[in-house]
Image (cartoon, helix red, strand yellow):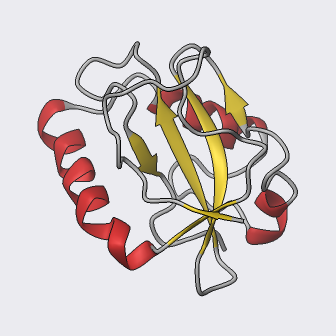
Amino acid sequence: MKKIKLNENAGKMTSIDGYRLNPTEKYVINIEEEMEFQSATMMAFQIMGPPPALKNYHAWLFENNFSVEAPNPSNDFVAQYYGVKPLWKTRYSQGIVVKAENESDYFIVMECSRENKGYKYTNVIVTLGGCL
C-alpha cells in the first residue's frame, strides 16, 4: 500500500493519460489531514459550481443502483475495485477507491482531468463520510 496526500501536486499532470493517480495502485490516505482541503473544495463547488466531472460520479451511482440524492455505496461494493481498476474513467474524470490509513473505511476519489476549468487535476473525495 502506498500512502499519499491528495492534491499534493495539484495542477500538475504526471501521466500520459492526464491523471496522476493509478487505479491499480493501493493508496491509503490520512482522512483527518485531507479534510481541510476537501472542505474548501466543497465550498468552491457551492460558490463556483461543481466541475462537469461530478456528472461522471452521478452516472456511476445510477448505473450501479446507488442513490444519487443520498449516495450510499458500501465498503463491500467498492473494495472489489481497490487497487484493481477505476470505478469509471472518462475524459472529465476517473473514480478510484482509496482506503483510510488507520481504519477499514474506503473512500471514492474523483480525479478531475484537464477538461475541468477551475478544477484541473483536483482530487475530490466524493464520499467524505466514507462508504457504508
Left or right, 112 with respect to 105, comes to: left
Residue 58 lies, with reference to residue 117, above or below; the image says: below
From what the image shows, is residue 122 above or below residue 117? below
* Residue 6 pos. (x, y %): 42, 53
Residue 44, position as x, y percentages in the image: 18, 42
How far across and down, in percent of the image, does residue 72 sit? 63, 62
Residue 23 in the image: state x and y as whole percent.
Answer: 72, 41
Furthest residue to the left? 47
Residue sitting at x 58%, y 78%: 101
Number of residue marks: 0
Q: Nearer the viewer, residue 23 or 128?
A: 23
Q: Residue 46 is drawn in which quadrant? A: top left
Q: Is residue 26 left or right of residue 110?
A: right
Split into 4 quadrants, where in the image is the C terminus? bottom right
Q: Please tell me in which quadrant of the rendered image residue 21 appears.
A: top right
The reply, left or right, for residue 132 in relation to residue 130 is: right
In the rendered image of this protein, does residue 12 appear above or below residue 34? above
- Residue at the spot x=26%, y=51% of the render? 42
The front one of 75 and 70 is 75
